[in-house]
């Protein structure tokens, strides 16, 4: 029953024994165990996605800083965007089958990523915290991935003024925007 996906608690109820006893039997019989809580997981997701730098991860991290949310009291992060196809591409990149939701009032799509490990990585590795908007610090992005990170941030919180031939980045955190300005200036761009 365990190998077919049932929880130790459910097996224990059916056998009229405790979940602890079921765990002991599984251990004694060398049954390979699932990660704790994984039986509850409905949708798949590469929960270690933000651990390894790549062009795509850098882009998504930049996009997340612009349009993402870190939940304060629960184990999830989410990304919001008007353009559904962007979230579909991010979902595919993260090997997720999580459905998108749409806020009917704002017409914004939301990709919820319910995963404790991913939330901890966003906070502990990249320094993105709940209510990040005004307090976001620029993460330690390796130089080789910086252009992808900036492009992701721009796609989330940037726009083009065609008449004035300018690109504009928007953000609430002065510290983040100062760091971004310094990086762009170091590349010879007039900021």
Image: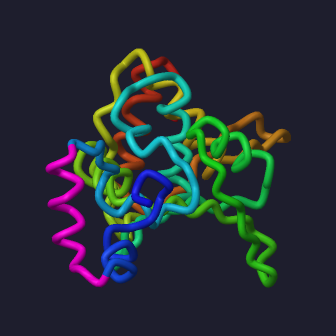
Q: Magenta includes 135?
A: no
For the N terminus, which image quadrant? bottom left
Predominant secondary structure in magenta?
A: helix
Q: Is residue 38 visible?
A: yes
**Image height check: is 134 above or below 52?**
below
Which range of residues does the magenta coloring cover? 16-29
**Image height check: is 172 above or below 117?**
below
Q: Quadrant of residue 105?
A: bottom right
Which residue of the protein is positioned furthest toward the right in this rendering? 163
Q: Position of residue 176 (x, y in %)?
A: 37, 49
Report whether 189 appears left or right of 174.
right
Report whether 51 appears left or right of 29.
right
Which residue of the protein is positioned furthest toward the front in this rendering? 15
Looking at the picture, the colour scheme in use is rainbow
Q: Position of residue 179 (x, y in %)?
A: 35, 40
Residue at 32 percent across and 68 percent down: it is 8
Viewer-nearest residue: 129 or 118:
118
Viewer-nearest residue: 165 or 41:
41
Residue at 48 percent across and 41 percent down: it is 46
Residue at 66 percent across and 65 percent down: it is 110
């Amino acid at each position: 029953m365990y190998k077919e996906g049932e929880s130790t608690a459910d097996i224990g109820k059916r056998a009229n024994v405790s979940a602890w006893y079921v765990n002991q039997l599984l251990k004694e019989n060398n049954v390979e165990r699932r990660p704790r809580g994984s039986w509850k997981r409905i949708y798949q997701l590469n929960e270690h996605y933000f651990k390894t730098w790549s062009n795509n991860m850098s882009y998504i991290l930049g996009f997340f800083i612009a349009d993402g949310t870190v939940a304060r009291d629960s184990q999830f992060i989410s990304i919001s965007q008007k353009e559904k196809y962007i979230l579909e591409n991010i979902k595919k990149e993260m090997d997720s089958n999580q459905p998108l939701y749409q806020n009917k009032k704002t017409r914004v799509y939301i990709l919820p990523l319910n995963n404790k490990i991913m939330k901890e990585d966003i906070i502990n590795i990249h320094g993105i915290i709940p209510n990040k908007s005004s307090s976001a610090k620029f993460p330690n992005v390796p130089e080789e991935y910086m252009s992808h990170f900036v492009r992701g941030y721009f796609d989330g919180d940037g726009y083009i003024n065609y008449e004035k031939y300018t690109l504009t980045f928007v953000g609430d955190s002065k510290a983040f925007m100062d760091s971004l300005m310094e990086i762009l200036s170091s590349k010879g761009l007039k900021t």
